[in-house]
Image (spheres, rainbow, N blue to C red):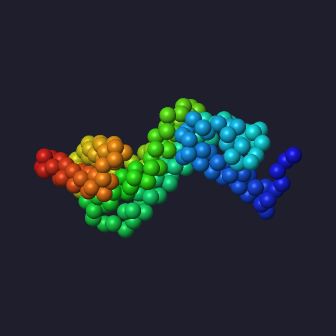
Amino acid sequence: MTPRIQEATIREQRQMRQRQLMDAALSLAMEDGVDSVTVSAVAKRAGLARSSIYEYFASSADLIADLVMEEMAYYNKRLLKAVDNVEDPFEYIKLWIEEALQYVVDGRHLLVKSLNTVTTPNYRKSDIAQGHRDLMGTIIRPLSEIGLPDVKLGLAYVQATIDVASVRIESGNDAAQEIKFAQKFAITGLRALLDNSA
């Protein structure tokens, strides 16, 4: 039996069903890891027939690619909201690092890490790569504004600092303290890069 149409238009119905499937996949991934996101498990969680998933996604890998894209967009919004209307580039970088690490504290980064272990369809890889570039793009402007001659070098140092702090937070160290250490280390390091370039 085909599910009844609950929305005003077919387009709205399709959007609602796709959202329902995405939410089901997200909850499975958050609860039991990415390996639990199978077509049959998602269909069961969403209360739909297994075959209905293929009306929206070519495969579970395609669905996971959509989850990765959605999660990166969510993370991007968080980062931009944290630095909204911040003029001073060093303050921007500090707040950006804090929000990036707060995302680790919240545990959502584990979702992205696990989702990235799945082989995504080739035709989705460029979308995911663009999503990652968009994320990193949120820190490029302030790194340029502080006068770094090599913005990629500054970005690499900031990313490495976040990676180390993330591991330390995941290992059970005090998150607030680790965030402060990461901010201080990154800002001091960026200022040192500026001094050496003069």
For the residue pair 43 and 125, the one nearer the viewer reads as: 43
For the residue pair 12 and 181, the one nearer the viewer reads as: 181
Q: What residue occupies the far bottom of the structure in this picture?
A: 85
Measured from the top left, where is residue 48 in percent x and y?
76, 46
Measured from the top left, where is residue 25 in percent x and y?
62, 45
Identified at 50% across, 44% down, the residue is 111
Q: Quadrant of residue 63?
A: top right
Res 159 visible: no
In the picture provided, is 36 more to the left or to the right than 155? right
Identified at 45% across, 50% down, the residue is 107
Whether residue 13 is situated above or below residue 170 in the rendered picture: below
Res 160 visible: yes
Q: Quadrant of residue 98?
A: bottom left
Whether residue 96 is situated above or below residue 119 in the rendered picture: below
Identified at 87% across, 46% down, the residue is 1
In the picture provided, is 49 more to the left or to the right than 36? right
Q: What residue occupies the far front of the structure in this picture?
A: 172
For the residue pair 56 and 29, the one nearer the viewer reads as: 29
In the picture provided, is 76 more to the left or to the right than 144? right
Q: How many discs mark residues in the rendered view?
A: 0
Measured from the top left, where is residue 83 in percent x and y?
37, 62
Identified at 15% across, 47% down, the residue is 197
In the picture provided, is 35 more to the left or to the right than 145? right
